[in-house]
Amino acid sequence: MRERITRRSLLRRSAAVAAPMIVPAWVLGRAGTAAPAPSNRIRLGLVGLGSMGLRHVKGFLEESDCDLAALCDVDATRLKEAAEVIEKARGQGSTRTFADYRELYACPDLDAVCLAVPDHWHSVVAVQAARAGLAIYGEKPLALTIAEGRAMVREVERCNVVWQTGSWQRSTWHFRHACELVRNGRIGKLQKVEVGIGPGYRIEPQPVMPVPPGFDYETWLGPAPWAPYTEKRCHWNFRWILDYSGGQVTDWGAHHIDIAQWGMNADSTGPVAVEGSGDYPSDGLWDAAVTFRFRCEYANGVVMDVYDDKADHVRFIGTDGWVRVSRGDLKTSPVALIRERFGANEVRLSGPSSQNRQGHRREFLDAVRVHGTTICPIEVGHRSATVCHLGNIAMRIGRKIRWDPQAERVIGDDTAQRMTARAMRGTWTV
């Protein structure tokens, strides 16, 4: 069968032969420059237009070489709001809108998609985007379960598409500098990592409510178990319900545990044992952990303690000092470490030096142009999310679990192993 020629296939072919000739816009500086010709812009579709999705709409609008060509959401109100933002910013009234992501994927002129759907949908929409040949910016945490995360990795690599995990802290200077200090031995031998994440939330039982007009609630539930509609189940609040997410452990853990893994040089592996305890509400609508503490043991002897703390941070502790980093600051002991510079033969972690998530989007677009590797490829996103999932599993069953990070299996505990996957409702599958 003859291959169908599309913009996305042409982009991948031209990247393969002409990558050295492409100069990313951020190298030249975009301020005051003319917008690229339409044929040179990356045509992007966005799936999921809640709070994070709308941030991505506004963020990608700042990139002059990116056309927001198509939008998708199961909530007509959010779909309309995002389309109006684009029209106001660019006078672009031709952005196509869809309620079904599969119709968006079928658009032959798209090059890439940004996926910002609830966690329980991540694997399904990502696998199908990869099969459609689209470059993908996928929000964190990578997947709802370890098994689905590995399925995503396999399919993205099989389809050879660009992937950027939305763990944008890797694209900021101070997080990268903190990890470079650790990786280059500036605090001596690493012994311990502390990860503070904000506590979770609880709420009383909620009444059943009528589904709002224009909201396809059945599709929103998708592969998750059926449950009656109530307002605080959906949109932002999905994070606090275990059928759809892993609570703060995966929501913020996918950011800060990701940095811990980066600093430990553990992007392709994980802990060998995990144990801890958490307060999981037994009544009310939200059932993810409110308070929590778990410890991860790594094969090299390093331990990582993850716990609820209003002061979100990552702290690396070595034999000769420590480094503490958060979105607000970078601190070191000795204090002079913060001014350290690195030699040509030392570890340098690549990526843009942005102060926010905008550099992460820019890095993704540049990778799409040359069909290159991003700063947070899918294997990395999967490994970071896996640590979060293992923490939840150990706390929920109340005992220490042994983990084989190469085989990605729990050792000697069938109950814990079953919790690395889930049954999907209806015909949904990966």
Image (spheres, grey):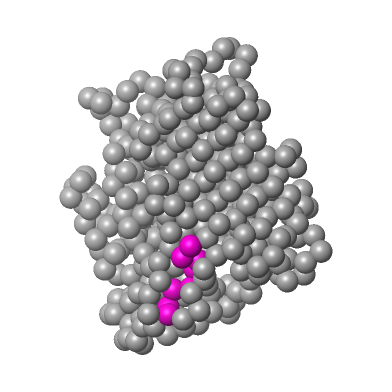
Q: Is residue 208 above or below residue 238?
A: below
The one of 421 and 203 positioned closer to us in this rendering: 203
State the extent of the magenta-drawn residues as a range: 284-291
The answer to whether one can see residue 162 in this image is: no
Q: Position of residue 234 (x, y in %)?
A: 38, 72
Residue drawn where x is 34% and y is 61% of the image: 50
Of all residues shown, which one is farthest toward the top?
Answer: 344
When asked about the image quadrant of residue 377, the answer is top right
Say whether residue 34 is left or right of residue 264: left
Is 98 rendered above or below residue 364?
Answer: below
Q: Residue at x 39, y 52 (%)?
A: 310
Residue under the image location 44 percent in, 73 percent down? 286
- Residue 237: name its quadrant: bottom left
Q: Residue at x 53, y 21 (%)?
A: 20
The reply to whether residue 383 is in sight is yes
Magenta span: chief secondary structure:
loop
The one nearer the camera, 410 or 78, is 410
Q: Is residue 288 magenta?
A: yes
Give coordinates of residue 44: x percent, y percent: 40, 47
Which percent across, then down, holds residue 14?
53, 32
Is residue 250 covered in magenta? no
User: Residue 211's spot in the image, x, y percent?
Assistant: 33, 82
* Displayed quadrant of residue 62: top left
Query: Where is the N terminus found, in terms of image quarters?
Result: bottom right
